[in-house]
Image (tube, grey):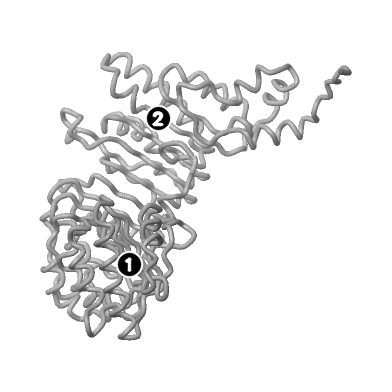
Amino acid sequence: MGKVSNIPLPPEILSEIFHLAKAKRRPYHLVPLEVIFSHVCSDWRNTLLADSQVWTNITIHSPKTLPRALAYLSRTAPTSVVYVRVELYDWDRKTRDRQERNTFLESLNAFLESCIERCKTLLIFTYRESTSSAIVKSLSASAAPELERLRINNLPPDVDSNPRDLEHPDVLTGGAPSLQFLEIEGIHSFPPLGSLVTLHLHNLKPDWFTYDVFKDISTKSVNLQNLSLEAQTFVTAWPNDTARPSITLKSLRSLRITEHFPGLLVKLLLTINAPRLQSLWLVAETTSFDFLFDSPQFLASQSKFANLKYLTLDSYNMHSLHKFGLVFPNITHFFIPEAPLFHLKHLAAAFSSDPPLWPKLETLAMTAKSDRRQMNLKEALCKIVSARAEMRVGLKRFLSHGDTVEFLKKQESDLLNEHLDIEELCTENFREPWWLMMHESHPDSIGLS
């Protein structure tokens, strides 16, 4: 066998290989791919060090990784944008020494202040609310002209001994004109909201999330299209706008409300007027919707969310399913994630009622908490398909997880095969906005791509 000559690749080809091979996010216990490449040979190392775009993804997990972040930042071009991830969950949970914590946070804050003007995305992920508050406070007067996505995540506030004593100043008061995505969990330090398209407010607490605060947020978020709200506790001190909504969100197209205790969901739906709303996603296992259904707003159903196309009832017990058909009659897509299949009789009754509910419905999507009642699901679908075909408002498509789809297809039901396309639920065949956003990957996403 002849000798194989070593022909070095041109730097531009090497650089393209490095960019394609580098992961967006990598477990913190593994050596970064760009570091591995730099140890292959001197040519690779020189090419890597000279390519300022290789080092723009910066992740900080602990004091040990801060020097690496500083080195990465120094290798980027002075005018290039950077994508910064501050993932301190493990360090924040395990480190108790106050001096160690303060020393590191001071250095971390200095680093963030030095690069915030170049950040395109910023993730702050901590265990304690007090830690994320301290980091955010350091950026209170900063400007972030390039920032498009800001995500601040931490556990619910009960891990802190005195969460009420925390300061919550506004952040980035120097300006953030490009900010389109904001997710805040627990804390309530807000950047400028004028450019926001998507807003997530999670772990809402009634001591600060009042009607007046929400109205102020709504007034400032003039371009808001997607709004997700989640409350962990009771929300009671809101007006009951039964007759007419008091807050208008003119640009809102997608609304998602999650509540773990009754109060927030019904009050918000009564408060909000959203003439362009196309998608409504509700997560509430125990909420009674009777107060909502009986309000004058929803009795005049044609004018409340008249453009709604997607309705999602997450983990819903389906007891009052037929009433949703009375207040949201024009939807074309109905999604029930984590459906309790032991309540299928309510599903079958609502979708096969005469006169028909949801006459424009095209797609029914459903995922189940258990696959033990798949035969019951098949029987319910047969009843629905048969009834709607007779009323000439036939259902076109049923979407679910792969195992449920496989089971239904194995049944070889002539009725289902003739009237219904049964497909595995995915982003290609179900274009509900929140479903699509859940499956997007961004440099600030939590987890691995």
Classed neighbour count for the residue bearing mark 1: other residues with Cα under 10 Å, few (<14), some (14–19), many (≥20): many
Q: Is residue 168 above or below residue 295?
A: above
Residue 400 sits in quarter: bottom left
The secondary structure type at the circle numbered 2 is: strand
Residue 10 sits in quarter: top right
Q: Is residue 90 left or right of residue 210?
A: right
Q: Note whether residue 250 is visible.
A: no
The residue at 51%/38% (across/down) is: 119
Q: Which residue is mark 2?
A: 87
Classed neighbour count for the residue bearing mark 2: other residues with Cα under 10 Å, few (<14), some (14–19), many (≥20): many
Q: Is residue 378 left or right of residue 439?
A: left
Residue 89 horizontal/vertical position (percent): 34, 28
* Residue 116, label in figure: none
Residue 78 horizontal/vertical position (percent): 62, 33
Residue 408 horizontal/vertical position (percent): 36, 61
Quadrant of the image containing the N terminus: top right
Q: Is residue 189 left or right of residue 290?
A: right
Q: Which residue is mark 1?
A: 334
Residue 161 sits in quarter: top left
Q: Amino acid at mark 2?
A: Glu
Q: Amino acid at mark 1?
A: Phe
